[in-house]
């Protein structure tokens, strides 16, 4: 790492954005390296980089050249400690439910009362069509298929052969397609 001049430090402390950008650019490889090694559940790479930047700003604020320590070494320790503290905080047991949970999809909104009513009416219409168009065997074969049962399993419950269930299911599908609005 290149040594950082006292002039650059003074300008960055004074709020010079160009000097601050130059300081960040010089320290960014160290920040990124520390962020990569401090990733954890609840602390992803980008968050660890942000913690490293906070450590760099803290180092800039607290640095005293009179101590005789080069800024780069002092800043490296501040960055490392900030990232390690963030990792420890993220992996605490109290955060386990957040770290281990599965996020809910945001794009799927819960249906409102209107959508629920429409879905209920549609379901009732379809069930009425099934009841009026299909024979009892066709209806039972269709409902068993919709429940995920195989033809052999449905045949056991209905007391007929699997081939009879398959034929009844085929007839039910044909009738429902022909009567579709």
Image (cartoon, rainbow, N blue to C red):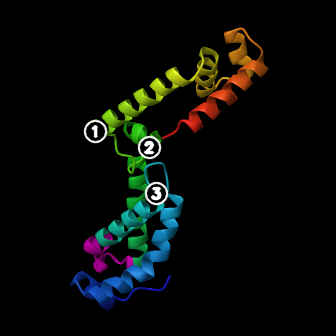
> Are the residues flagged by discs 3 and 1 in contact, CB closer than 8 Å?
no
Q: Residue at x 45, y 76 (%)?
A: 28
Residue at the disc numbered 3: 44
Say left or right for 14 vs 77. left
* SS category of the residue bearing label 2: helix
Graded by Cα atoms within 10 Å as few (under 14), some (14 to 19) or many (20 or more), the crowding at tag 1 reads few
**Corner quadrant of residue 173:** top right
Q: What label sits on residue 14 in the rendered view?
A: none
**Corner quadrant of residue 23:** bottom left
Q: Which residues make up the magenta segment?
A: 59-71
| Location of residue 180 in the rendering, given as x and y in whole percent from the top left corner | 52, 39
Residue 156 vs 113, above or below: the answer is: above
Mark 2 → mark 3, Cα distance in angstroms: 11 Å
Mark 1 → mark 2, Cα distance in angstroms: 36 Å
Q: Residue at x 43, y 61 (%)?
A: 48
| Location of residue 181 in the rendering, given as x and y in whole percent from the top left corner | 48, 41
Whether the magenta-drawn stretch holds residue 63 is answered as yes
Whether the magenta-drawn stretch holds residue 85 is answered as no
Mark 3 → mark 1, Cα distance in angstroms: 40 Å
Which of discs 3 and 1 lies nearer the camera? The answer is: 1
Graded by Cα atoms within 10 Å as few (under 14), some (14 to 19) or many (20 or more), the crowding at tag 3 reads some
Q: What label sits on residue 99 in the rendered view?
A: 2
- Mark 1 or 2, nearer chain start: 2
* SS category of the residue bearing label 1: helix
> Could you say which is closer to the camera, residue 157 or residue 37?
157
């Amino acid at each position: 790492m290149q040594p950082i001049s006292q002039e650059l430090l003074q300008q960055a402390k004074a709020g010079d954005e160009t000097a601050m950008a130059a300081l960040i650019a010089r320290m960014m490889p160290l920040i990124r390296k520390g962020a990569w090694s401090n990733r954890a559940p609840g602390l992803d790479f980008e968050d660890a980089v942000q913690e490293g930047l906070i450590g760099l700003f803290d180092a800039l604020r607290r640095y005293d050249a009179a101590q005789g320590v080069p800024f780069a070494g002092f800043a490296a320790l501040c960055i490392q400690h900030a990232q390690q503290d963030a990792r420890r905080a993220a992996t605490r047991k109290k955060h386990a439910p957040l770290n281990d949970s599965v996020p809910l999809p945001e794009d799927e909104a819960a249906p409102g009362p209107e959508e629920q009513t429409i879905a209920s009416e549609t379901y009732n219409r379809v069930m009425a069509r099934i009841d009026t168009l299909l024979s009892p065997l066709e209806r039972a074969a269709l409902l068993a298929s919709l429940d995920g049962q195989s033809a052999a399993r449905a045949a056991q419950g209905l007391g007929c052969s699997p081939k009879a269930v398959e034929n009844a299911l085929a007839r039910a599908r044909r009738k429902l397609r022909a009567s579709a609005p």
